[in-house]
């Protein structure tokens, strides 16, 4: 049984290391960092660096755990390992605040987040490790409170919140592990900790694949929940009609490069105003609204153009890949596009 558990841990370690490398190369290099959406590029740069530190830090922790399971405890017992523990938590904070905060200003007081790192590496190991876990869980509680503040926007999220809750539960288990550290063996502690990190990557990877727009959705929900109205002096009825004209008549949703900023430019308003308009008038985020328009058009084409392939229909409605099209179609209709076409086909008399 112990061998099976260790093999599972090794698999989770390998998965998390390769996932971290993949996310560094793809997710943190996406166009979302290039489009500021009203935020300073320097703030986006800080967020990107924080994300890279978080992923690299977790990957290095897993490498240390792998070496420990292979009988080499040098990395685990080093001051660098402790420094990594005190680095990943604030890196997680700086990465998350870009998504969850409407205004993303940075000031010198934020340097206080580096104090635990500066002090922790000089503390006795049996005190430093539980402290690092306690601080890390504090950041997760901060995230939970922010997400709870979005409860008025909960209709815009479904399984996304389940995924976030799963990661929160893993964080609580990490905290419990830090508390019981003096009572368990090193083998149990590091094996369990490595497995929990692997589970976090597993949930995060599933979330990114299943909900590729979750970052922008949460960001828009945060703006809608916390921002002061920017539409007080605007004719919202006229703006709503103009938006419907652009989407339903001119079919801007079919443009692969359509973004919140480019649509706002067409509307002759700023991105915050457009985001608030879509939220208040449609009860959705920008990305959700665009996905629904694209899927509605795809549903029509699947029925009226039986000779067109499913992939060509997905690409013609604005999706950039088959996986994104299938994921969005299944999310909105509850079935793959091929099954939808079969169900809607009229049988010959």
Image (cartoon, helix red, strand yellow):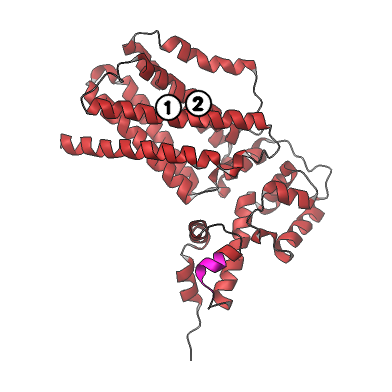
181 in relation to 97, above or below: above
How far across and down, in percent of the image, does residue 271 sit?
72, 43
x 70%, y 59%: residue: 252
Type of secondary structure dominating the magenta stretch = helix
Name, please, the residue furthest toward the bottom: 349
Q: Which mark is residue 57?
A: 1
Name, please, the residue furthest toward the front: 25
x 65%, y 34%: residue: 102
x 81%, y 42%: residue: 232
User: Is 196 left or right of 69, judged from the image as shown?
Assistant: right
76 in relation to 200, above or below: above
How far across and down, in percent of the image, does residue 182 sit?
27, 16
Q: How many marks?
A: 2
Are dots 2 and 1 in contact, CB under 8 Å? yes
Element type at marker 1?
helix
Q: Nearer the viewer, residue 349 or 62?
A: 62
How far across and down, in percent of the image, does residue 19 sit?
40, 40
Mark 1: give few (<14), some (14-19) or many (20+) Cα within 10 Å.
many
Q: Which mark is residue 91?
A: 2
Mark 2: give few (<14), some (14-19) or many (20+) Cα within 10 Å.
many
Q: Nearer the viewer, residue 346 or 194?
A: 194
Q: Is residue 235 visible?
A: yes
The region drawn magenta spans 308-314
Picture quadrant of residue 162: top left
323 in relation to 149, above or below: below
């Amino acid at each position: 049984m112990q061998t099976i558990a260790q093999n599972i841990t090794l698999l989770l370690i390998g998965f998390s290391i390769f996932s971290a490398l993949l996310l560094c190369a793809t997710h943190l290099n996406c166009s979302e960092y290039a489009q500021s959406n009203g935020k300073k590029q320097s703030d986006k740069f800080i967020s990107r660096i924080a994300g890279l530190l978080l992923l690299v830090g977790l990957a290095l922790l897993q490498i240390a755990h792998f070496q420990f399971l292979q009988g080499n405890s040098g990395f685990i017992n080093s001051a660098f390992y402790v420094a990594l523990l005190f680095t990943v938590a604030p890196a997680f904070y700086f990465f998350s605040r870009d998504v969850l905060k409407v205004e993303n200003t940075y000031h010198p007081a934020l340097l206080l987040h580096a104090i635990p790192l500066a002090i922790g590496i000089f503390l006795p190991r049996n005190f430093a490790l539980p402290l690092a876990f306690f601080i890390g869980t504090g950041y997760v509680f901060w995230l939970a409170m922010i997400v709870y503040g979005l409860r008025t926007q909960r209709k815009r999220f479904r399984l996304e919140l389940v995924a976030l809750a799963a990661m929160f539960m893993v964080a609580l288990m990490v905290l419990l592990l830090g508390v019981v550290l003096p009572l368990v063996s090193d083998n149990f502690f590091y094996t369990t900790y490595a497995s929990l990190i692997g589970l976090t990557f597993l949930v995060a990877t599933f979330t990114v694949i299943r909900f590729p727009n979750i970052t922008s959705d949460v960001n828009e929900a945060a703006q809608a929940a916390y921002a002061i109205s920017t539409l007080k002096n605007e004719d919202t009825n006229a703006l709503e009609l103009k938006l419907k004209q652009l989407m339903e008549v001119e079919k801007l949703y079919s443009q692969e490069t359509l973004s919140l900023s480019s649509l706002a430019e067409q509307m002759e308003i700023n991105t915050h105003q457009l985001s608030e308009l879509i939220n208040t008038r449609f009860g959705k985020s920008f990305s959700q609204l665009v996905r629904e328009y694209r899927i509605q058009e795809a549903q029509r084409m699947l029925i009226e153009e039986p000779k067109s392939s499913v992939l060509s229909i997905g690409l013609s409605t604005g999706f950039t890949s088959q996986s994104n099209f299938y994921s969005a179609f299944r999310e909105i209709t509850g079935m793959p596009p091929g099954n939808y076409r079969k169900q809607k086909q009229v049988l010959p008399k």
